[in-house]
Amino acid sequence: MTCDTEDPGKRQAYLDFIENVQPKLSEFADAFNRRLAGHPAVDELPSRYDLMIKCMRTDIDIFSEENIPLQIEEAKLETEHSTITGAMMVKYDGEEKTLPQMAVYFENTDRSIRESAWRGVVSRMQQDTERLSEIYDELIQIRHLIATNAGFDDYRSYIFQAKHRYDYSLDDCLQFHDSIESVCVPLMHQIHEERRDALGVDTLRPWDVSEKSGGGVDIHGRPPLQPFDTVDELVSGCSNVFHNMSPEIGGMFDMLRDRNSLDLESRKGKAPGGYQANLEKTRIPFIFMNAAGTQGNLTTMIHEAGHAFHSCYSSELDLIDERNPPLEFAEVASMSMELMSHPEWGEFYDEEDARRAKADHLEGIVCFMPWMATIDAFQHWVYANPKHTREERAEYWLGLRRRFGPRTDWSGFEELKETSWQSQLHLFQVPFYYVEYGIAQLGALQLWQYHRKDAADALSRYALAMSLGNTKPLPELFGAAGLNLGFGEEHVGSLIGELNEALGEIQA
Ligand SMILES: [Zn+2]
């Protein structure tokens, strides 16, 4: 369906699955969970099923009949959010453009073009600010009710159970935010200060740097990086990258190419975005993306290939459930592949551009962590205080921006800044899904540390841990690769410290 959104047959089949098959599936899954977890012989199962049974018991515990209509209500609001944001178009340069298409202008070396593009985007978003605030108000009330119906004090405690977060707590997340504040935020300010200086401006404005990724126009006025022109170049370059790293992952990537499991080119009728999906029947991973020749596309390709290697390594496990790892570890497979492939980026670039691409990537990691903490901390407050007013929410958000955000000058856009959280889809669509990226990044950075010392050793750690799929709790998955699951300042500080050292070497 995502490969061909204009085919009515495919769309119909997809809607049929969503509307008619999936609700039945969740009903049957609940019945199945109860049958299995309540079976007298369940404790005699081999220990590799412990985690699966534990998750089933949680799902049974938090299930509440009263929540079914509320969840339908929630899904309708989420769909309305998708419809509203999907319909946002901006008239620019004489053409109607989508918001992702507008992002190209934020890398333009002409500051006035960046500014007018940014103004175009935000004035379009402002047309829907009021309705999006209403939707979020309603979602918070519904989610709070879902939690209390299931016997929890608030939605935070409920969602930790619903997401099977057994191995880290609310307090661990708060500690993680503190560590990011003391480790990443000062470094981010330093990176932004260099940007301000290189651009020769008094203050950075919102069109000079991305609040989320720290990226934006090249500070030396060079045109955007262009690692490849055609999808064939992307595929053959990546095949070389992975073969150079190890014949094993190189072979896995070639298998995807030879089995037609890559849909990479951008074309009319294709859904936006990128993903890796494991086709459960053949157990062959499938990668979808919209490649247009940018550095972002190259990292996406390597990222999704990392997910695919994870699928390949765990493909021998019997059950679908065993082959679906927790997100906190799935993203270790993909994010570590981005980092470990650095030495091979010369397949796409000359030496200077390879340095530039790597430095941008590493700076992006530093700058993303504070944004991740902002979004996570915001949700903690929102659901711990479900009776808050919009004024209080705006005040809390602005406080978080002061704590974690860049020192960007928003003058003239003060009101807009109060609701700038609305640009983060996860808040509406997948509540509390965000800290996973940060946790996984800590794991990825540790694997990269091993890789910088001994590449073969790191890749064998990778293979071993990925082959476990979803059969072990999170700390054991981390442990299998020799990684620590921790949130303290010292741990985060040592990882970001080494990243900063590597950044210095690249830029030297
Ligand atoms: Zn991913």
Image (tube, rainbow, N blue to C red):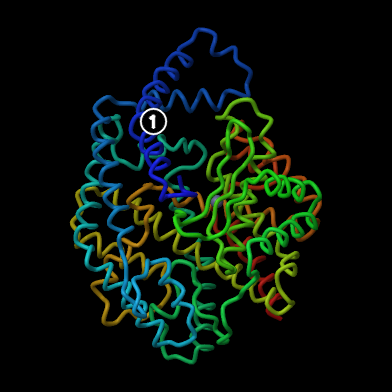
The reply to whether the residue tagged 1 has its Cβ within 8 angstroms of ligand 1 is no
Does the image show residue 365? no
- Give the residue displayed 73% in from the left and 49% down from the top: 254
In front: 245, or 436? Answer: 245
Displayed quadrant of residue 201: bottom left
Does the image show residue 438? yes
x and y, in percent, of residue 138 in the image? 21, 47
Image quarter hosting the C terminus: bottom right
Instruction: Tell me the kind of residue under disc 1.
Output: Gln
- Give the residue displayed 39% in from the left and 23% down from the top: 60
Q: Please, is residue 312 above or below residue 427 in the view? A: above
x and y, in percent, of residue 409 in the image? 36, 81
x and y, in percent, of residue 116 in the image? 35, 82
Give SS at disc 1: helix
Left or right: 231 with respect to 155?
right
Count of number-bearing discs? 1
- Give the residue displayed 37% in from the left and 82% down from the top: 115
x and y, in percent, of residue 299 in the image? 61, 62
- Give the residue displayed 52% in from the left and 60% down from the top: 266
In front: 86, or 2? Answer: 2
Q: Residues within 10 Å of mark 1 (few under 14, many from 20)?
A: few
Image quarter hosting the N terminus: top left
Q: Please, is residue 54 above or below residue 498 in the view? A: above
Left or right: 487 with respect to 478?
left
In front: 338, or 53? Answer: 338
Q: Please, is residue 160 above or below residue 53 in the view? A: below
Displayed quadrant of residue 392: bottom left
Say which residue label 1 marks.
Answer: 22
Displayed quadrant of residue 415: bottom left
